[in-house]
Structure formats: C-alpha cells, structure tokens
Image (cartoon, helix red, strand yellow):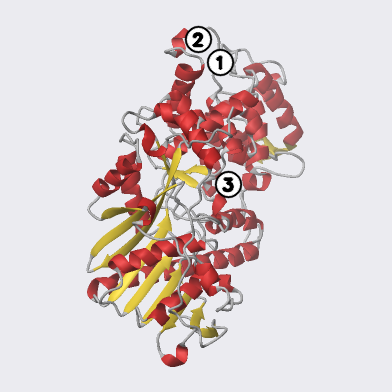
Amino acid sequence: MTTSQETSQYFYDLFELGLEEYGDYESIQEIIHNLKIFFEHPTSCTCRVLEKQKDIRTCFEKIGFKKFFQRHFQIVNLTSKELDLFLKAQLLAMEIENKNLKYSEKIIQRTNYRFCFNSTYSLCQTAFLMLYNISNHKFKNIVEHLHNEGINERIHGNTGRAPIYKTKVNIDENLKFIVKNFLNQYSLIHGLPSPMRHRNDSGAFIYLPTDKRFISVYKEFKKFYLENILKIESENDLEEEKIISYDSFRRLWNELMPNLKFQPLASDLCDNCVQFKSKLQLAKRNIDEYNNVEAEFNEHKKMANLERDHYNNNIELSKNDLSIAHICYDWAQNVTIPYSPQQAGPLYFLSGYAVHLFGVCKTEGGINKQLNFLIGEDELPKGTSKGANTTLNLVYQALQIFAKNGKKKLHITCDNCSGQNKNNLSLWFWTWIIMLGWYEEITVNFMIPGHTKFICDSFFGHIKKLYRNSKVNQIKDIENIINNSSEGNESIQYKNGLGWKWYNFGELFEKKFKTLPNIKQYHHFRFNNLPENKGKVFVSTKSGGEEKWFNLLKDNNFSHNEPINIIPINIDLERKLYLYKKIRNFVEEPHKDVHFSNPDSNEMEIN
C-alpha cells in the first residue's frame, strides 16, 4: 500500500471522475491513487481470456472505476470487526459446493469460491482482494477462521479504525466570488499563451506553467485568504477551521473557471486525442470496435504529424533560401496594468487596464525574430476588437517592416481559429496582397486543431516569465519587458496611430470578393501572381494533397489600389471612469495619469 507521503504529489480531479461528493475526506486522494495504479495495469487482472473472446476488458474495467471506487471506499471505512463479518458473509454466498478429493488414503477437503462484484460481474481473486483492501495473507487467515470457527468474531488487537477527518465549510456565493476572483487574477499573472484555440475564441483555455500544481495554487490561496480576508498572519491564529479544504477548492475551480488548466508536459493538448483515448477504453468490450477506433486515432495522429512536418519544412526553406519568407502569428493572453510580484490584495477583486499582445514571428536564415504589437484596451478599433480585421492589420504592418523586401515567396502558418485566421476576409486579404505584387506566391497552412504549438508560443513564454517578476505601471514598462525578454523579441506600440493605422479591410473587400464554400474543411491555401490566376485560390485538405481552385473575385476589373478607410479607436468613458476611481490608487507615482487620468465626465458615476 502506498503511503500518504508517497502520494502527496498525486492529485486527481474529483469533478471529472464524478466523485465530487467525496471532496471533504482527507484520505480520498490516496485511495484514488491506489485504485488508479491498479486500473492502469491490465496485468492486475488474472481472469482467463479465451481465444475467441471479443470483450478484452479486464474484470474491473467492466465494472467501471466509479462503481468500483464507491464500493471500495465503503469497505475501507469499515471497522476490522465489520470487515470480517461482511467478508465472511460474502464468502459464504460465493462458495462453490465442496468437493472431496481422494489422494492415496487421505481425503482432502477443498473449498472454492466464485469471486464476484455482484450477480452481474465476476472478479478474479486479485481484483477481489483490491476491492476489499486486504492482502492475500489476511484473506487466507479469514478463510481459515471461517472454516474453523464459522462466522464468529476474530479476536485480535486492531479492533478500531482510523477516523475520517472532515473539513466542511459553508460554501456560499461570497466564498465562490472570492475563489473565482483569486483564480482570475492568478491566471492573469501566471497564465501562459494558449497553444490552441477553440472555434469560439472567447472560450480559449488559459494554461498555467508546468511547474505549477493544484496544491501549490491552493497554498497560495490559503495565504491570500488568511492575509486579506481573515486578516491574520498564520493558520496558528485560527480559532476554528475556516478555510475550505483542498478538494473543495479544486471542485470550485472546475465549476467557476473550467478554462483554467495546467499545461501538460510534451503535450499538444488535443481534445480529439483525449476523446480517442476515452473511446479506446470503452471499446475494449469489443475487439473489432477497438481496432476501428485505434485506426481512426492513428489516422488523426498521422494528419497532425503531416502538418507538423509541413510547418518544419517551411522553417527549413526560409533558413536556406533568403528569397522565401516564413511567418507565424497569434494572439497571446492579455496582461494588466498595474502589476507587481507582490500584488496588493484588493486588486484580486478589480479589473486593471488590459494590454493586448499580438506576435508575428519570422524564421529566416536560422535566426528567429518576433515583432510583438502592444495594444492598450483603449487603442483597439471599433467593432470586433480582436477579430479578423484587427489581426490582418497587424500582419499587414509586420510584413512591411520585416518580411516584404527582397522576397519572392511567403509561407504562413497559423492556428485554426475561424474568428481570426481561417475565414474569408483572410483569403481576400492574401489575394489582394498578391495583386499588389508584393510576392510571386503565397501559401497559408493551418495546423490540425489541438496540435498548433509553434514558435510564437516560445517567444510569448519568455515575455510572461519576465513579466511575472517585474513591476508594471505603464505600457512602456511592458515594452521594456518584451525587449529584454530575449534577443528575438521586439515590441511596437500604437502611439495614437504613429505605430500603425487601423484599416477597414472588410469594407474594401466585401463588395469585391466572393466567399469560399466549406472553408473549414481545407488546411492549405495557395495564391500566385500569374495573370491567368488573378483572384484564384488553390485549396487542399492536407499537405501534398490534390488541389482545387476557386475564383474569389466578383469583378476582374477590381482596382487593388483603391483607398482604404481608417477605423477610429474605441473609447469607453464609463470604463475610463472605472479605471480612474478604482485602479489609479494602486499605480505608483509619477505614472498615475498615464492610463488612469480623469476622463473629465461629470455625468457618469460608478458606485
């Protein structure tokens, strides 16, 4: 049996296991860990497998982890006396009729048992002993005592049981509010850029670094709760238990912020991969179904590897041929102002000035460089603030700065976010860039959803690492953090339109171009500047796959030199007043008026 000291590093999500009602029992993590180890090794089952048997699940897999755990948990909390009597009753019910076996002149009496979970599921002896949490030695002693003494009580020294300590706390809406705000602020401080995005960007996951654990975050929450809510210095000053248990904290985490997760080691965090693994477990009851699911899973991994190889090949091409430009681009998680490694407690409940970060990385000649656009929340254009038009504006600016002159071909890699990247406005934009004569050919490839980790995430990680240990009172501080985070990172600010303009590409293109049917099924798009291919896009579903072409132009007389209107930025006076009243006091002098000046509005009040 594994000790609690050995299992302290293992923590299981009770919410995902459907065992949230057990969250307030301190021994729960150790019990789950022991069962998990048992379930993860098919060799734990000693049931005989027939050659033509289709159901290849172990005896305990047929029962299922939750049902097995619930029975096991009830049994481990029995007293020794209760366990003896219960087990003896079960053995009597499972006993097979005695057979007298005669060897020479001796008659040997042997008792056999048909071990089972209930009348539906049979068990091998190994699984049965795990279910009852007893060793083989103890089991033999109980069987021997049953034969000799019947169901009478076994007399031994260990007649008690260890108490189950509970740490129940009244979890009301106020406590939920405190936990949610703590986790929200914690994610802003420690969160890493998401290596994948969902179709709806508003639901993108936030990933905490791999050096963080649930238990470490819980300890920081306890410290915060003691110092800022209970206003005491240590747990020793508590008169009674007032802090929620670790498992209750995790349960609230899953309920209130399910999008805040930990970044797994060497994992692409693919939802499809997780689903396939679950399907493989369920399909064990039928070997034919198992083989079909396994084939689909292998095909998915093959497609992901194919696109990953295509991405790596583009990097190699840009290293060896300076006439080829290769770029990747993505949005990072927002950072906030003000920020300090020793954050003032009340800021956990407030919403600071948000700064958006967008990176365009080029790989050229073996040297990678990323241009990071810093955009304050009051510097975004009106409309969809982080939509396709905003994204393309920043890419347009980056191309002019470091990936246009002297280049014949442009290769682009980005993720599958349809709101920002894989959409018709992006296709029209690249068609227009070809018509401008910037490149002879442009290719755009989208990596398989869930397998979209690429070089931008590495540069964002350097920025986040330095940001967590720095004081920030103005956007200039973030600019310095970016420029000092790594040799390849460089920042650029909006500066009231001096850094770049917000062009209305949607307004220019919508009346001139047609939409591409079923755009989401394609992963590769190609454009070239041959006269006969004006307005055409060549598409394929995979790298090296068969291409189809579509004409995106409504009118071949479209002039690519038409002027583009500029979008004004979005100014929210109510939000500015909130920042002035609620956040300004936390900013150090002399920076209070940089982002938190009085908006000079006498009509608006915030309670």
Q: Is residue 224 left or right of residue 64?
A: left
Q: Position of residue 247 (x, y in %)?
A: 56, 29
Q: Relative to residue 397, is residue 135 depicted above or below?
A: above
Tell me the residue at 28%/66% (across/down): 402
Q: Amino acid at mark 2?
A: Leu
Q: CA distance from mark 3 to mark 2?
A: 51 Å
Q: Are marks 1 and 2 in contact (CB under 8 Å)?
A: yes
* Identity of the residue furthest to the bottom in this view: 532
Which residue is label 3 attached to?
A: 46
Q: Secondary structure at mark 3?
A: loop
Estimate how packed mark 2 is, as few (under 14), some (14 to 19) or many (20 or more) residues with alpha carbons within 10 Å.
Answer: few
Give the numbered dot on residue 242.
Answer: 1
Tell me the residue at 51%/35% (across/down): 577
Estimate how packed mark 3 is, as few (under 14), some (14 to 19) or many (20 or more) residues with alpha carbons within 10 Å.
Answer: some
Tell me the residue at 70%/21% (across/down): 85
Q: Position of residue 580 (x, y in %)?
A: 47, 32
Q: Position of residue 24 (x, y in %)?
A: 60, 24
Q: Secondary structure at mark 1?
A: loop
Which residue is label 2 attached to?
A: 238
Q: Amino acid at mark 1?
A: Lys
Q: Secondary structure at mark 2?
A: loop
Tell me the residue at 57%/16% (across/down): 162
Q: In the depicted view, which residue is nearer to us: 471 or 74?
A: 471
**Looking at the image, is mark 3 or mark 1 earlier in the sequence?**
3
Q: In the depicted view, which residue is nearer to us: 144 or 460?
A: 460
Quadrant in the picture for residue 137: top right
Q: Relative to residue 454, is residue 112 depicted above or below?
A: above
In this rendering, the label closer to the viewer, 3 or 1 = 1
